[in-house]
Amino acid sequence: MMASSYNAKEEDGHHSGAPAHGGAAAAAAKSKKPDNTAFKQQRLPAWQPILTAGTVLPAFFVIGLIFIPIGIGLFVTSNNIREFEIDYTGVDVDSPCYSCARNFSWNNTAPCLCSVDFTLEQPFESNVFMYYGLSNFYQNHRRYVKSRDDSQLYGDRSALTNPSKECEPYRMSDGQAIAPCGAIANSLFNDTLELYHIDSNGTRNTIPLVKKGIAWWTDKHVKFRNPGGNNNLTAAFRGTSKPVNWRKPVYDLDPSDPDNNGFINEDFIVWMRTAALPTFRKLYRIIQKKAVTTPTLPSGRYVLNISYNYPVLSFDGRKRMILSTISWMGGKNPFLGIAYITVGSICFFLGVVLLIIHHKYDTRNNSADIPN
Amino acid sequence: MERFHWVQHRCRTLLAGDSGRGWYSSPDGLPNKSALDTHCSPHRISGKRRMVFARHGPHQHDYETISKSYKGNAIRTTKYRLLTFIPMNLFQQFHRAANLYFLFLALLNWVPVVEAFQKEITMIPLLVVLTVIAIKDALEDYRRYLFDKKVNNNVVRVFSGKQKVYIDQCWKDVRVGDFVRLSCNEIIPADMLLLYSSDPRGVCYIETANLDGETNLKQRQVVSDHPLQGVEFSPETFHSRIECENPNNDLNRFRGYMEHSSGGRVGLHNSNLLLRSCTIRNTETVVGIVVYAGHDTKAMMNNSGPRYKRSQLEKRLNTDILWCVVLLVIMCLTAAVGHGFWLKNLKDPIFVTDVETPPTLAGFYVFWTMIIVLQVLIPISLYVSIEIVKLGQVYFIHNDLDFYNEQLDSRIQCRALNITEDLGQIQYLFSDKTGTLTENKMVFRCCSIYGVEYPHDENARRLEVYEAEKEKDKAAGQSVTLRSGCSGKSLSCRSLSCNRSSVSLHTLTAESGEEDDPRSNHIQTRTSAFCSRMAKEVVPDPELVKKLNWFCSSVLPLSEGSSTTSSSLELTYITDFFLALTICNSVVVSSASQPRHMVPEARTPLKSLEEIKLMFQRFSFSPFSALSTLSPPQIKGSPLSFTSRLFTRGKAGSFTISTTPSSTDGSEPGKDSYMETSNLRRKLDLSATGEGGNAGPVEKDIREDAIKDAKAQTVCGNGPKQDVETDSDSDTDDELLYEAESPDEAALVHAARAYRCTLRGRSAESLLVDLPGIGSLAVQLLHILPFDSNRKRMSVVVRHPLTGHVVVYTKGADSVIMDLAETPKGAEQAQEIYNHIREQTQKHLDSYAREGLRTLCIAKKVLEEEEYDVWLKGQLLAESSIENREELLLESAQRLETNLTLLGATGIVDRLQEDVPETIEALQRAGIKVWVLTGDKQETAINIAYACKLLRPNDQLLTANCGSKDACAAFLQELKLEVLQGQDSMTERTAAGTDGESSLGSMASFVLVINGQTLDWALQEELKSDFLELSRRCKAVICCRSTPLQKSQVVRLIRDELGVMTLAVGDGANDVSMIQMADVGIGISGQEGMQAVMSSDFAVSRFKHLSKLLLVHGHWCYSRLANMILYFIYKNVMFVNLLFWYQFFCGFSGSVMTNAWVLILFNLIFTSVPPLIYGVLDRDTPAETLMGLPELYQAAQASKVYIPHMFWVTVLDAFYQSLVCFFIPYLALAGSDVGVLSFGSPINASALLIILLHQVLESHTLTWIHVVVLLLSGGSYFGFVLLFSVSCVTCSPPTNPVGVETLQMSQPLFYIICAVTTVTALLPRMLFRALHNTLHRSAALKSSQMDKVASEEYRKRMQHWNLSHSRVNRLPVCADNPGLEPGLEPCTSSVVS
């Protein structure tokens, strides 16, 4: 390289003095021999999951055998759940709430009242959960979901008077901060539902509806707090204004119970947990089981009294009232049971098919594990 | 950490435009770059010169003004400084497209109308990437800073102007113009001009291993007119001005002159320059003046980072990424249109915040929002992952024990970090021959002098015996049967070793029992000292020895009854021939007993030298009359006879030494420290001589001679004394070490030594040579015209020690020398003789070439004094000129090297590297077409091709040697037709029903052999397609006599026109262009310096490593990476689609059902490591299987893993899984009171499970690392969300996660949903895999399931196959060349059975 010289290679052709790489690191003193470890030589003991008919067929059978019973169990459970649903939107002319629905205006101060009769064919044995359901209501809209101020709801005083920008355009009203701000709070569901049982002699018996315990414990106790505790909410919320669509300020949501008033009003909390899908239900009340012997809701005629405040017709929405018992797997939903049974059956069937294939093509004894 | 170089290199490349392409654009890398085109280097600015004065001399003022602009010797290789790190690093990082994409997304999120997440959250991916890379950069830079600091603070002795002595100074304080004094083994701190050397001849030796990796010493010369000896150089007296060219990066070039205060000028050139980072060797003290310092030094200017190549897979990946972009745009458009319509149909909603936005505009906004939401669909992080995976792959390749070479203590070097998977895609392999297929360890094999061939049978047998021993060792050592291709070979080896054992039997009978000991020793030590011994121990040809003896002895009359009649003319030829071998080289002699290089004192020649001189003079004056004038009595009684006796006695003497080794050892006190080496060497020596003597009649001959000589010895008076002296001579002989710049030279010097023509020492003006019968002679060395590739020869001009004439000895490529060797004018008889010699020599040359030997011709020329004087003037002029020096020197050399007298030719064996045939066979079975591109002659090339099984005996050889372009065109057409016909018949034959297994080998296929000239035609535009067509149909192509440029042209042609992956492998500078041209360049670090390695992507030490590199690592890397990419795309599509499906239920508003943190971290943390592990550790087929069944390589080659439809299958599967993963939870929860986050919780969890389990299904191997990583990934997700749902109260508006996951995970519904979702999603893939594996069992799967019995059977079949084919008759061209073709020995049927 340095001095050109006769070079064996040069017979191969012309010399080309490529620049040599300079400054190479000084030769390491120790041997460069790589370690002979299983890891470095890529000889780690490994399990090789080679999926063949023979190896996966037990899995298919096992899945089938597990899923089908689970599916049956789920299906039975779901079928045992009593559920009753009644639409009281008032779309049809002959429905009781038609006039209320038609004549709705946010400015009405007096609530429009209507009542719906219905009959329960079967008694509801255990605790009954009373839901209101809305359809075509996009509570999951991106801008809607964002339109709230968690700090304000957490009782943060500065956020109370200066809510997050996310609340726009329901942030300030008449120069005062809206509490609670944002579109979610603004669109709070404000129908009032009352349930009466009409017994055999025609008298209306009010069914006691429990309005506490419907919100998540974490929401009620961690996430939502009134500014300055639960004492004297009027003072605490001074300097704020009520949401535009609300009839009464937040500190008047439930004046009778300071533990259910203001931000920690459970109806409000439930509403604030936005629903995932445009058709949803939200827990409204709980009907506690009174005695072991009598059903919570015996079969028979019932009347649902509604103070119709919430407009849904404008966006083709629907309003429903749902009565439901729940099980360990939640509300009534036959889908999961069916899904399990279907998947289990398919697996079982495929297992059989694979068994046939295995016997036809894969006669040699193949084991999945080839130890290295 | 150094593997992160690429990041910087990429940044640098992006930043500096073309500066990073230094490797590609370097003009020096191109062939044909000779001394002629000196003006094309970009670094040279003609006209601008650098002026250097001594720093502390009288020109101090000048120095100040001039040197201000010169760089100091401190170096700084760091990229950043402490304060500027953050801005600089950020600036560089934002040159990466990926980061810009992240930045774009982050900025997009700041636009309020399209904002999808919290502003901070979209910054996270960007921040993470930036931080990770910044940390890498910082660490890397810090490491370099420390290294710089260490280098800068090295201490060196620099002359101080004040104190007038040399004082210790740090390297960084050395300035241009400083005088630096260095001792032996010190590293040179800057480029300096050598002004003084303690060596009396004014030379100094440097080792340039740090610079170019070559370990041989290079000689440097003190600037010509400086006092060579005597007083030490005093810097105060240095008043000269140095003018030289500006700093450049050409290591081989330095020009300038030194102007003395008196006005005289001295030319400076490369041999005066000591380069930074080289090491001083064999010289006690040197003093130099610094001319280039720091970053101006040639070493620093040659520094460049690792290469960056884009791999094929990545290119294909880009198209898929484009599809991802298309997918993203479609999804976003869907959302935008959907949102528009949704908004349009919406009347007076109370839940929408702003109703004023017109639907189209809202749709437009949603489009951008969706891009933010679905950003992970474009797997930008995939690029980061791929690079990390490649680092892991490189790590494993680098650590592979099979690539470790014990002898060189070297591993594989992975210089390109990002084309590992290309190794699995190679379709064409272009190989150099010398040094790549062969060892490039030259061993003298035979020679032809005076038109007489000396076959050196004994020598050949010796080489054969080594080969056999090696094979036997291998066979005995381990598992020959493991290598399926080897079976036939091992059998033939066995037959060879039988042969060998009979030889050793002979030895035992012929020699005394004492021979046993050294023999066994020899076998033990053979492995370590094998190669050097191979080269050194040349067994002389008995005939030639006899002739030499005749020359020396008086007893034998010239016409004594031997088969050849030797004339005295022939004898002069022989002597001249050996003298040429001895002196016509640039070999540096060092002696093991003398650590410092010293020239042994010239001994006074023997008294009767005069007589020999007389004889020589007579020969040279009238060479052809010598026959008549020379009379026996004249030589009678001369000391020649005596020395010849000594010569033979010396031979016998070595046997006697074997009996009493300790006594000779003790006799020389200086040898104590070298006891071990000398012991070892002597053992080898002994065994070699033993072997050499054992089998043939040589020993007898020699002994007879010895007896005769012994008789004659009694006549001589002072016999015993001389005897002792020569014995000690032969002892010191053994200590001599030759360091040659090319292995050829060393081989020739060793060969000459075997004939007692020993090169004993070298100085600037003379060479010390031992000649048989004459003793030590000092040959006055007038000039060395070094080798260059244009002349293809080198010459020395000496004053003949005996005749006193000026003689030129030339050694070079046969083609050149044969042309230059003119028929001398003169007597007809002489002409006749001379023509006869030429013819015979040519014949021998051809036969040598056929045997695969490298041939060299030796010629000489006697110059008249006047002639010499004339030439000398021109030469001096050329030497002293600054401009055009190279051209003038070339011209001058050409002027001298004319009218040469051909003396003879040599044949040098270059043995095949071990396992080359097996490797080539494996590569061919793997579907790789192997081409050999060599500069060697056609015969040599073909023979090597046979030896390495590139050519099979029943292959049809198509030879293309055309004189003109038209002929070439016609010929190509003709060959094409022939090939087509041949292939038709072959396909018929195969269709007729041979079993498919062995079709590759049994089918006689075509091999094209094309020479350089024809290749030139064939590469031209018009003939290109014909050539391509032809070569495509050939199994292999051998290009001989090809230039480096042609090599690269061929590679380019194949690569571009056929669009295939090419790999070039070579070891020398002439392969550099080819290596750079190919998709994958592999350098073999061997005997040829480091240029090939430096320009390569991977550097291995042996050709055989290629098979594992390609078949195993290439396959693995490719399948790993392809699978990883598919998995990565699957993962992203699957996850992103979940969000997309949700859009149908939220009015296409861009809502997500997940907490934004989880969404971002899902890709960044929870599912980021498993693909990496998959990409680094997965092993679809065990290494043994891949090596045993090279055919599997084709599977990857056909891109079966990563082909477009696999991409779409993957995407479809991802779609299916996301559908399942979204809609099962949807149907299970629809109509219930589920909240947004509660809805997302089971979806996320099951998506995670699906993604992780999908990998389990797709993985071919699962180790504990996989298990740990998978568990950690799953655990980190659940851990994170649980922790988040407990602790984050207001931290993540608006998707407040408090209590969501805890509540969800406490409900059985969550698990019920997850279970059914996961199972349903994975069911199809599992079923598909199972069915596919069962119904279409791939070869890979078969092989991995193949148990031992099956593989045993397979091996048997292969053995059988090999045997049946090795029996097929071979082409006659395959002459016996035992060193070359271990595997091709015909197997006798008895061995087979």
Image (spheres, grey):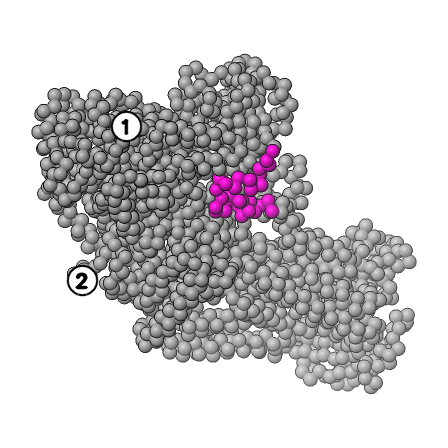
Chief secondary structure of the magenta span? loop
Q: Give the camera-side residue of B753 and A278.
A: B753
**Compared to B425, does B651 lie above or below?**
above
State whether residue B345 is above or below residue A95: above
Quarter occupied by residue B590: top left
| Numbered disc 2: secondary structure | helix
Magenta-drawn segment: B18-47
Task: Give the alpha-carbon distance from disc 2 to disc 1, as whole Å.
Answer: 60 Å
Q: Position of residue B1269 (x, y in %)?
A: 51, 55
> Residue B1165's spot in the image, x, y percent?
59, 54
Residue at the far front in the pictured view: B827
Q: What residue did someone put label 2 on?
A: B1389
Residue, disc 1: B803
Q: Residue at x 47, y 75 (%)?
A: A65
Residue type beneath disc 2: Ser
Q: Is residue B34 magenta?
A: yes
Please tell me how crowded label 2 is: few (under 14), some (14-19), or many (20+) other residues with Cα within 10 Å: few
